[in-house]
Image: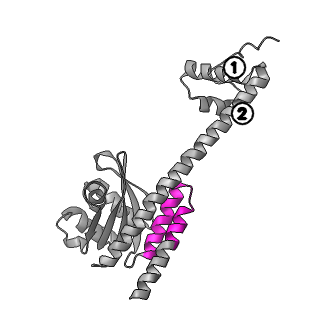
Amino acid sequence: MQSERLDLAERMGLAARDLQDGTDPQATMETAVRLAVLNVRGCDAATISLVEGQGRIETPAYTDDDARGADVLQSTLGEGPCLDAAWEERVVHSADLAADPRWPVWGARVAADHGVRSVLSVQLFTHADRLGALNLYARTTAAFDAEDRDDGLALAAHVAVAVAAARTADQLARALDSRTLVGQAVGIVMERYRLDPGAAFSVLARVSSETNTKVRDIAAELVATGHLHGTDRSPAPAAD
């Protein structure tokens, strides 16, 4: 038993390292659901569900169509463990969905239509504007025991940290891309109209204000096409 737990700790450590290597939120979530199937006993399929206002569920990552269908059905019916885990409870577990009184419609339908008999849903994100859950599905009843629930909690903690880090990296990369584009556009305006950097950026800012278009979008258009958005004639060149 002790060696089995050590092996589990090693596997969870490897899973955490796999997740932390990601810088793309979508790729990180797809890695997470695959790791859930590999590392949690009894788990046949997994999803990450994001719950928006009014109980609408999105499933950006899933391991098979039945698992995704289980999520979609919860969104359609407005009941199910994903919603409970995201909004109300940290961990939601059912050993027999076909007979679970908490979700009388969803449980019977998901068992009949998708062959899902057990579920373990763990709250994943707790941000005010983004709630979600890691959902582990099994095709047999009583598939998850207490140790599996602990494993699910541990994996969900790693996933939450990894996705947050990947989002930060993605946002940083986007910001750097924007700065690069704006810098290139400023350089074009400087060369074309013989302006200093401050004046060249002022041209982009003025066009942004007049056309109600983001500076980044104006810069991207100028770099790609050589055309200054919303203008039919060029700004007056600087005096020699």
- Residue at 41% x, 63% y is 157
Judged left or right of residue 65, residue 205 is right
Q: Magenta segment: does it hold 37?
A: yes
List the single residue furthest toward the top.
239
Distance (Cα) linking label 2 and label 1: 14 Å
Residue 106 horizontal side relative to residue 23, left or right: left
Q: Secondary structure at mark 2?
A: helix
For label 1, count other residues whose C-alpha is less than 10 Å away and answer few (under 14), some (14-19) or many (20+): some
The reply to whether the magenta stretch includes residue 129 is no
Q: Position of residue 215 (x, y in %)?
A: 60, 28
Given the image, on which type of amino acid does mark 1 rest? Ala
Type of residue at label 2?
A: Gln
Residue linked to disc 2: 184
Q: Quadrant of the C terminus?
A: top right
- Quadrant of the rendered image containing residue 143: bottom left
On residue 199, the disc is: 1
Specify whether 29 is left or right of 147: right
**Residue 99 sits above or below residue 237 on the image:** below
Q: Is residue 71 above or below residue 3?
A: above
Residue range highlighted in magenta? 14-39
Quarter of the picture containing the N terminus is: bottom left
Are there few (<14), some (14-19), or many (20+) residues within 10 Å of tag 2? some
Say left or right for 64 vs 138: right
**Label drawn at residue 87:** none
Q: Residue drawn 27% across and 79% down? A: 142
Judged from the image, the secondary structure of the residue bearing numbered disc 1 is helix
* Residue furthest out toward the left: 101
Please state the horizontal and vertical placement of residue 96, each as a whole percent of the image: 24, 74
